[in-house]
């Protein structure tokens, strides 16, 4: 690892521990040349996931898009940010566990709706109304009946 201060290659690890998110490792390093300390983070590199949109365009997976959709659906609902983050983590885990290089956006949407259904009914209906593009009140009512029947 190169020192960010003097660009020397002679650095060594003096402390290593899990980072706050428990998904990476925080390492304190010491430069043998200039004796300055710095921190590095090590994270597992994942295979880039490509999302196939409804119009067959492809784009790289972006967690923030899922977060934004879920936050809009949960707006003014009694759901904490921690619950939302955990749900998005669960969605992400399920998507990456499919071990596909390309995944249709419809699959992601269905996973999000399954998780939202368990989290909060109103948030689920809000998300479903946008995701499934309800054209009229009847399709909206059919979705509500499905929830009430369960």
Image: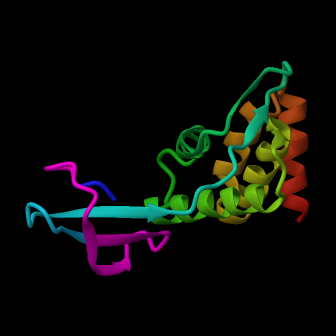
The reply, left or right, for residue 47 in relation to residue 1 is: right
Horizontal and vertical percent for residue 36?
10, 63
The reply, left or right, for residue 95 in relation to residue 43 is: right
Q: How many marks?
A: 0
The reply, left or right, for residue 31 in relation to residue 132 is: left
Is residue 135 depicted above or below 93 in this figure?
A: above
Horizontal and vertical percent for residue 15?
27, 81
Specify the segment rendered in magenta.
4-28
Which corner quadrant holds the C terminus? bottom right
Task: Identify the residue at horizontal 82%, vertical 33% (top origin).
Answer: 132
Depth order, front residue of 104/41 = 41
Depth order, front residue of 101/33 = 33
Task: Identify the residue at horizontal 14%, vertical 50% (top origin).
Answer: 5
Query: Is 13 part of what is drawn in magenta?
Result: yes
Task: Identify the residue at horizontal 76%, vertical 40% (top origin).
Answer: 128
Horizontal and vertical percent for residue 145?
89, 50
Horizontal and vertical percent for residue 42?
44, 64
Quadrant housing residue 126: top right
Residue 11 can be seen, yes or no: yes
Is residue 19 depicted above or below 87 in this figure?
A: below
Is residue 17 depicted above or below 51 in this figure?
A: below
Depth order, front residue of 34/85 = 34
Residue 20 can be seen, yes or no: no
Task: Identify the residue at horizontal 21%, vertical 50% (top origin).
Answer: 4
Quadrant housing residue 143: top right
Quadrant housing residue 97: bottom right
Which corner quadrant holds the N terminus? bottom left
The reply, left or right, for residue 64 in relation to residue 31 is: right
């Amino acid at each position: 690892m190169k020192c960010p201060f003097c660009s020397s290659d002679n650095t060594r690890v003096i402390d290593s521990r899990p980072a706050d998110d428990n998904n990476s490792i925080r390492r304190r390093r010491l430069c043998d040349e200039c004796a300055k300390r710095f921190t590095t983070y090590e994270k597992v590199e994942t295979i880039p996931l490509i999302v196939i949109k409804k119009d067959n365009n492809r784009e790289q997976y972006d967690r923030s898009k899922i977060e934004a959709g879920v936050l809009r659906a949960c707006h003014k609902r009694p759901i904490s940010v921690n619950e939302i983050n955990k749900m998005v983590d669960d969605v992400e885990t399920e998507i990456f566990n499919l071990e596909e290089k390309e995944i249709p956006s419809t699959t992601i949407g269905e996973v999000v709706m399954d998780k939202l259904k368990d989290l909060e009914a109103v948030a689920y209906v809000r998300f479903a109304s946008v995701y499934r593009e309800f054209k009229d009140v009847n399709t909206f009512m059919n979705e509500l009946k499905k929830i009430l029947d369960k």
